[in-house]
Amino acid sequence: MKFLISMHINPAVLESLTEEEMAAIGDGHGRFIEGLKESGELITTQALVDPSQAVVVSVRNGQPVVSDGPFLEAKEYLGGFYLIDCADRARAIELAAQIPDAAIEGLGVEVRQVMFADGVLEA
């Protein structure tokens, strides 16, 4: 079963962390990635730039309109994700709990099963 584990960032929370705490998060992600590779459960992982570098694309009167992002005003934003292939939802939750962000109040880790990928409905 495929699951998307997304990490939601609150910049105020990150700004309150010490350099050591930030380094521990980075190191923790490194260990987590290596563990997923060893178990064969990692499909891919990506980190995203800050929303201040995003643009929003919409089409009006048949023409693309590009504006500075992010689209929604919110204190949290999607910071990155892991796409995994594991046995079941319980295992996906177990893995998500190992992500360092999950232990920091104010940061969020969400687990969602993939229902459609590459033109195929997932079982």
Image: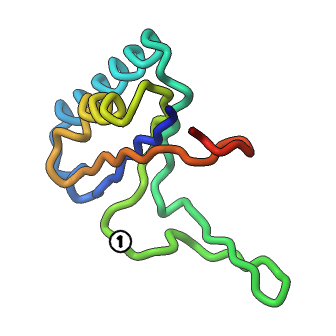
Q: Secondary structure at mark 1?
A: loop
What's the residue at 31%, 67% (across, down)? 75
For residue 63, side relative to residue 74 (left or right): right
Q: Position of residue 109 (x, y in %)?
A: 31, 46
For residue 113, side relative to residue 35 (left or right): right
Residue in front for this viewpoint, 18 or 123: 123
The mark total stands at 1
Q: Position of residue 20 (x, y in %)?
A: 17, 30
The residue singled out by tag 1 in the image is 74
For residue 66, side relative to residue 115 (left or right): right
In the image, farthest residue toward the right: 62
In the image, farthest residue toward the top: 38
In the image, farthest residue toward the bottom: 61
Q: Position of residue 87 (x, y in %)?
A: 42, 25
Residue in front for this viewpoint, 9 or 37: 37
What's the residue at 82%, 90% (across, down)? 61
**Label 1 crowd (10 A; few <14 / some 14-19 / many >=20):** few
What's the residue at 28%, 57% (across, down)? 10
Vertical position of residue 19 compared to residue 28: above or below? below
Q: Position of residue 84 (x, y in %)?
A: 48, 30
Q: Amino acid at mark 1?
A: Ala
Vertical position of residue 5 compared to residue 63: above or below? above
Vertical position of residue 108 compared to residue 92: above or below? below
The C terminus lies in which quarter of the figure? top right
